Structure formats: C-alpha cells, structure tokens
Amino acid sequence: MISNNLQPSPTLIYNIFRHSKILPHVDTIDVTNLNRQFLFRSKDVGQSKAEVAAAFINNRCPWMNVVPYHGKIQDKDAEFYRQFKVVISGLDNVEARRWLNGMINNLVEFDEDGDPDPSTIIPLVDGGTEGFSGQSRLILPRITSCFECSLDAFAPSAAVPLCTIAETPRIPEHCIAYAYVLQWPREFPDRKLDTDSPDDMKWVYEHALERATKFGIDGVTYMLTLGVVKNIIPAVASTNAIVSAVCVHEAMKALTYCSQSLNTYMMYMGSESIYSHTFVYEQKHNCPVCTTTTHHMSVPSTMTLNTLLQQLCDGEFRLKAPSVTSSVKTLYMRKPVALEKATRVNLDKPLRELISSGEELVVTDPVFPDTSLGLVIKFSDLGQH
Amino acid sequence: MIGGTSRKTKCPPAHVQFQLPMTISGRQRGTLTTLLSRPSPYANETGSLPIGEFDCASSSPSSSGLRNAKILVVGAGGLGCEILKDLAMCDGVFRDVDVIDLGRYYIVALF
C-alpha cells in the first residue's frame, strides 16, 4: 500500500499497535486533543518541541541517542549538515524546505571531471501532509531533481487583495485577515503577533468576530482563526503515520540499499479512498540550486535596480531579500547595516547608470544558503541609445 | 476546554505505563534484521534509481557502516514525532539521530 515495492512496513504495523495502547490514555477526546504530536504530554507545554521529543524517545527507547537542537535550521551551518548520512524533513512550509534543499545540495563536492563526489551526496527525504493527503520525496542532490526544480508545483499562497479585506469582506477568512493584518499592527505597532500565544490569538479571534458580526458574516471561530493565521490545515494522524513510514523506509533504503528507492515522488490520497501513486520529478535544466546555469533577463535600461529586485522576488525565482553585485562593484547589499546604507542610493537609479548591457550580476538571497545566482542582464531598449 | 488542561489525574511516567513485555532487541522483534540479513531480488541496484549495491552480509544494524550513520530529522511536529518513533523502531538501524525544531509546545499548536 505505501511502499513502491510492496514491502511490509514494520514501522507502520508497530504504529497501529502503539496507538491502540495510547488511545485509552487520552481521557477526553475533542477536536483539539486528537493530537498527532504524540510524544508530547501536558506537562511539556511551553517546552522546546525538539527537546521534549528527544527526551521521550531516549527514555522509551534506550538504544536510541537522540540529540535535540532548539532553533532555526538557518542557524546551523554547512559543517553541521555535513555530518549526517541521511536527512529527513517533516517541515510545514515551503520556505524552510527551499532553504534545507539549497543547503543539502550545496554540500555536494565535485571532482576534476565535474562529477559529484558520491560521499558528499546526502539523501534528503522530504515528507509533507495536508489533511488526508500526503507526500514523500527522495532527493539525491545533483542526481535527482531537487525541491527547487519543482517549486512551480507549489503555488504562491493565494493573496486576497487588501482592499477586499479592508472594505468588502465576504467570507470569515477576510474578517480574520482584517484582524491580524490591519488591526493588530494598528493596536500593537511595536509587537509582532505571536501565533503560538493563546492570548494573542484570542485577541485576533475576538476582533475578527466583531467585524464578522458587523458585516453579517457567519463562521468565524477560534479554530478557523488559528487555521487562517497560522495557515494550518488540520493534521490527520493516519496521514502522518503513513507518510513518515514511507520517509523512514526511504531513509533506511538510502542507508542500507536493501530495496529499491523511491523514484522520486510518492503521493498518498486518503480523502476519497486509500490511493497512492508515484512519479518522477524531472530535473529543471536551469534550476538555480542544482544546476550552475547562468540566467538571462531582458529589461529596459531605464528600469531601476529596485524594480529589478522586485521582479526577482515576484518572478520565477521567488526570492525573498536579494542582494546583488556586479563583477566590479556592489550594487545593493542588505547586510551589514553600513553596507546597506551605502548601497541604498543605487536602488532608485536606472540600471544603465549601474551596469552595461550583457553584464553578469551575482545575486544572493537568504532562500539559497551559501550560494548565488548568475544573472546576465540585457537591455531590451539598447538600439535606442 | 482545549487540550488536556483540565485532566485531574497525573499521568504516570511513560516507562511505567507502557512497559514492554520483554527487552527489545533485533532478534526478538525480528522483521528488519531478518530483512537486512538476507539477499533480496529487489535490492537497490535493481530499481529505477540505483544508488548503491545491497550487501546483506554487511547490512546488519551492528555493522560499522550503519553504526556510525547519523540521521537528521528536521521538524518535531506531527510528522517529526512519527518519524522519530519510526526511526527508533527500526531494529537499531538508526541510533544516532539529531532533531531540530524551533517551535515550542503549546496547546493551541496541537493540530
């Protein structure tokens, strides 16, 4: 059912039996504590997830040595990631996946012939679930496609025009967006909304409800508020169990070669019935992460640097905070502060004052750790000058 | 009520509540150690994405290659917990696991 080669799944079987033991332990069952994060107990509220999970496993399974890190994946450097034989990710957002994918791809070293050194290839197994749907993917950096190759498969989150939110809300989500996008910064200009804080979320819920009442819109609930603000789709225990079993299978196969690896993507769909299929994600020939392609852009010479940077964010690269240098000078750098200040003047200058047509720029961005993007800019209006 | 905050009785520690019937060892639970110790017609090199050759003689969980293999689990949420548990139940194939997550447990975060 869940493996691409009909292997039995000891982990999944174990899991099913485990759950039958764990369930009676939950004394009251309501929607909120049908909880998938089963390594967690109520005494752990406020504790680091990584630390609690590691302590639980180490305690229950004494043969395990789980070491927790409480922090952002972006705080760890290449040296940290290099020490692993396999990386399994169970992340909940595209941005963290992009970063991790970039990092693991960058660890690959090449020999003099330009072939990747197999000992530096760390298989990355990526799992993801959304309600009754789930997926698992095996990324062998520089061998298979990488996450960035298929970024197009993940539509940027559907944006609702701000004016709709501000003036003509129609659905409960608009009211919730109004409360946290517009009302919160107005009320608390110095404090960012903490989506993990029950007090903050209650505030958003109450203000969303107030607005919904005003516009005669039904359906604003605390749960929906959490869902909208944190972009949560309720997790389903069986989906998580199946997807994680697939991920661990892939990790095991990548480590022992005991069975055929997933090539390269598997999707599980449990909403209609139990169904899964696999397909191959092809490598994108000009992927900014796993190929060394130089990219080309044709823009008017009158375009400002700022507009160009904005295009890099809105366009196919989906950058977040690009910095850019030419072969001879720094055009715009976001860090350190002094350099940002010194290069800020360039933002409003037209490109023709900064570079010549056909010049290659080097673009760096936090979504691509330790790597850069080669970008050749051609002026589309060159003939006129 | 959200979550288990109103629970009156204190949970006994995990090892008391879920005492396993016997010491867990690969031999007693079997499955994966057995799988790794026998040749397979579906070994990795026969698949469409061959990355290595399966050698059942050196693939026991106690073999040195595997013993030193460190795994990183990124995220300790709904999937991360399952992944950690699955890794732990893999007959000792995975022992050294690092887990990274920036989050903290909150009752509201539990779905």
Image (spheres, coloured by chain):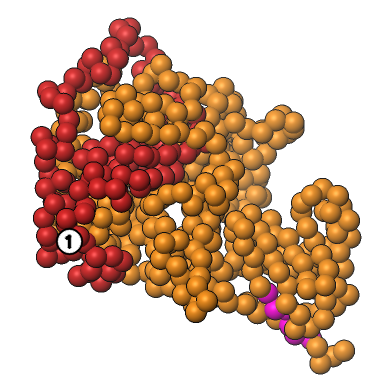
In the image, taking residue A328 as reference, residue A221 lies left or right, namely left
In the image, taking residue A240 as reference, residue B36 lies left or right, namely left
Quadrant showing the C terminus of chain B: top left
Residue at 64%, 40% in the rendered image: A181
Residue at 76%, 80% in the rendered image: A359
Percent x, y of residue B16 = 23, 14
Quadrant showing the N terminus of chain B: top left
Quarter of the figure with residue B14: top left
* Residue where numbered disc 1 is placed: A5
Identify the hue of chain A.
Answer: orange
Percent x, y of residue A113 = 49, 79
In the image, taking residue A103 as reference, residue A87 lies left or right, namely left
Chain that is red in the image:
B
B88, B33: nearer the viewer: B33
Residue at 52%, 33% in the rendered image: A70
Tell me, yes or no, whether the highlighted magenta stretch contains residue A254.
no
* Magenta highlight: main SS: strand
Identity, as a three-letter code, of the amino acid under mark 1: Asn
Most extreme residue toward the top, as rendered?
B8
- Chain for mark 1? A
Range of magenta residues: A375-381
Question: Dot 1, crowdedness within 10 Å: few (<14), some or many (≥20)?
Answer: few
Q: Is residue A209 above or below residue A99?
A: above
Residue A313 visible? The answer is no
